Amino acid sequence: MKGKSWVGIVLLGFFIFLAHCSVPFMMDDEWYSTNLATGVPLKTFSDVLEGQVWHYLNWGGRSITHGILQLTLMTGELGADILNVIMTFLLSYMICVIAKQRNAKCFLLSLSLLIALNANTKMSMFWQSGLVNYIYSSVWILLFLWPYLKVADKPEEQTGEKFRVWLTMGMLPLGLMTGWSNENMGPTCCVVAVLVILYHKFVLRRKPPLWMYAGGFTSLIGSVMVIVAPGNFVRSNAIEDKGLFLTLQERFFSMFQAGMDFLFPTCMLVAVLLLVWVCYYKEKLCMSQILLLLGMVLSYGAMVLSPHYPDRATFGTMVLGIILIDTLLAGILKKAPAMEKYVNIWQLCACGYSILVLVDVMQNTGILG
C-alpha cells in the first residue's frame, strides 16, 4: 500500500495545484493587493506595514495573517500557487507529526480529509485570503501545539538544556503568531498551553520548563491583540444593532448550523472512532487526545462571541479533529491489523472524493469549461 499511497499523494497534489491555478485572486484579494492606507498597489514591505497599521486601527485585528497574505499577493498568482501547495503539504505533514504517524499512508489520508471534510473547500483552501487565514495559520498553530501535546503524553522525555533555551526563544514569536491568528484558534491554543502547564505542575508534580510559560504568555498577548483591535469596534459600529434577543437568537442558530452542518462529518468520524476505541476496546484516551478533543470543543464554542459563524471558520476545529481521527485509527489498527484492508478502501474513497471536489472547484472557475 505504501507505493499506492505515494501515487495518491502525487495525483492529489497535481489536482490541488491545478485547482489553485484555476482560482484567481478575487474579492478581498484585490483590496489586500494594495496599501490599505493609501489604496495604491503594493510595492515594498513598508507598504505592507503601513497598510496593516491602518487595518488594525480601522478594520480588524488579524494583522499577522493579513500581513502574510499581502506578501503572498506580491509574489503574483503563480508564485502564490506554488507557495500554497507547499503550505498545504506542510500542514498535512504537521498533522502526521502530531498524530505520531509519519508515513505516506497517514499523509495521504490527512491531505484527503482536509478536502473531503472541509465545509467550504474553495473559500478556505483556494481563495487566497481564506487560504492564508486558515491553511497558513494552521501550520504555525500546529507547530505551537506540537511540543505541548508531546510533553503531555511523555513528560519523562526531557530535552537537553541547550535545546530548551532555543525552544524558549522560538516559543516567544511562535506563541505570539498563534494567538494573533484567528479569533477562535488563538485563545484555544492559549488554554491548551495553560492546561499542560497545570497538568505538569499539579498532577505530575514536575516543574514546567520555561518554554511552556513563554508560549502560553505570548499566545495570550496575541489573542488579546486580536480581540481588542480598534478596528473591530469601528466595524461593529457599522453593523445595525438588532437588540439582545435577536442577537442571541442569531448566534445560537449560527452555532447550531456550524455543529450540525459544517462540522457534522468530522464530528461523526471522531465519535465513531471514539466509541470503537473506548467502548469496544476499553482503552483510555491519552492526554494529548483529551487535549485535542477539548480543543475541538473550545474552538467551536469560542465562535459564540462572533456575530457571524462562516463555514470556513470551522477549519481549525476540523484540523484538530483530523489529528484525533489519525491517532484513534492508528490505535485501532494496532488492536486489529485485519482491519487495514478496510481502512485502505476508506482511504481510497477519501482520496477519490477529494479529487472530485477539486474538479468541481476547477469547473466552477472555468478551467474545465
Image (cartoon, rainbow, N blue to C red):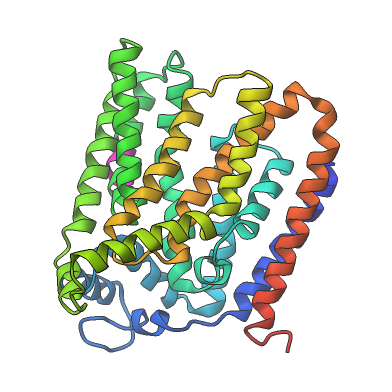
When asked about the image quadrant of residue 332, the answer is top right
Is the residue 365 above or below the residue 265 in the image?
below
Left/right of residue 345 with respect to residue 156 in the rendered view: right
Residue 243, position in %: x, y? 18, 70
Image point (64%, 48%), residue name:
110
Q: Residue at x 85, y 41 (%)?
A: 1
Q: Residue at x 64, y 35 (%)?
A: 273
Can you name the residue that lies furthest to the top here?
205
Q: How many marks?
A: 0
Asked if residue 89 is positioned above or below residue 207 in the image, the reply reads: below
Image quadrant in which you'd find residue 112: bottom right
Name the one closer to the observer, 331 or 209.
331
Residue 173 sits inside the magenta stretch: yes
Q: Which of these two is toward me, 251 or 291?
A: 251
Q: Nearer the viewer, residue 186 or 24?
A: 186
Q: Is residue 163 left or right of residue 88?
A: left
Residue 249 coordinates in the image, percent (x, y) = 31, 63
Prevalent SS, magenta region:
helix
Place of residue 355 in the rendered image (x, y in percent of width and height, measured from the top left)? 73, 65
Q: Quadrant of the C terminus?
A: bottom right
Q: Position of residue 153 (x, y in %)?
A: 48, 22
Tell me, yes or no, if residue 207 can be seen here.
no
Residue at 40%, 57% in the rendered image: 255
- 267 in the magenta segment: no
Q: Closest to the observer: 122 or 173?
A: 122
Is residue 49 visible in the rendered structure shown here? yes
Which range of residues does the magenta coloring cover?
169-174
